[in-house]
Image (cartoon, helix red, strand yellow):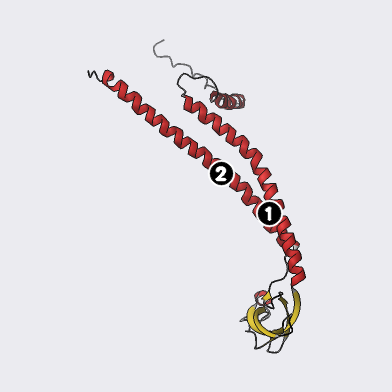
Amino acid sequence: MAGETPRSQPTPAGPGPEAGSVGRPYLLSRRWRRNPLRRPTDRLRARIGLVLVLAVLVAAPAAMFRVGDSAYRHYVSTAAHQAQTRDHRPAVLTRDAPRHPEPGSDEAKKARYPVTVRFTGPDGAVRTGTTEVAPGLPADSTVLVWVDAQGGITGPPLTAEEIRSRTMGWAILAFLGVVVTGLAAHAATGCVLHRRNLARWDADWAATAPRWCGLP
């Protein structure tokens, strides 16, 4: 009838999880399927990208391991040399250390102030240097300082935690270096191929434009 209200139609079912799961592999496979519009440079770029991905997957962990191992050996050797050439020596403050504005606070317990101290070097000569001490120490107080073979105040030998931290830092830098190199190589090859495509388009258009525009 003319005045009859049309029946509502069922809502089309949206793509379910199966359609999405099938679509993703399909989209990935399309990059490698034959296509009459695909240029040789497109295939070359896809192959270069695949080779670079595989190269990064192999080279990045290898570089991370080798650089990390070399860094670990270096820092272990450095720590051993420091332990042999550095020692703790008593030093006397030549003046009062500054007082913290909030004595007894947690910040005061962690605070350190540079103060000039007097100590005896490995050669027996009396020397002076600067070291950090707790706040409020009076002059003529005795503290322990690390002294190197040349008689200068220095830091303590590297600890095991410091060795691990520095080793991991170099290993991560090596890993990131390989990844960045792979990305840079992919970008460079893409730029070169893009310029080649532009040059070829210009040449093809120069040959086609006269016929397309009806020019003699």
Which residue in the protein does label 2 denote? 181
Q: Nearer the viewer, residue 110 or 85?
A: 85
- Residue 59: name its quadrant: top right
Q: Quadrant of the N terminus?
A: top left
- Residue 181: name its quadrant: top right
| Residue shown at the point (54%, 21%) measured from the top left | 33
Question: Tag 1's secondary structure?
Answer: helix
Q: Residue 164 appears at what percent x and percent y?
A: 72, 57
Which residue in the protein does label 1 denote? 168
Tell me if residue 22 comes above or below residue 160 in the rendering: above
Q: Amino acid at mark 2?
A: Thr
- Tell me: 14 left or right of 93: left
Q: Nearer the viewer, mark 2 or mark 1?
A: 2
Tell me if residue 82 comes above or below residue 99 in the rendering: above
| Residue shown at the point (62%, 51%) measured from the top left | 173
Q: Residue furthest front?
A: 123
Tell me if residue 40 comes above or below residue 84 in the rendering: above
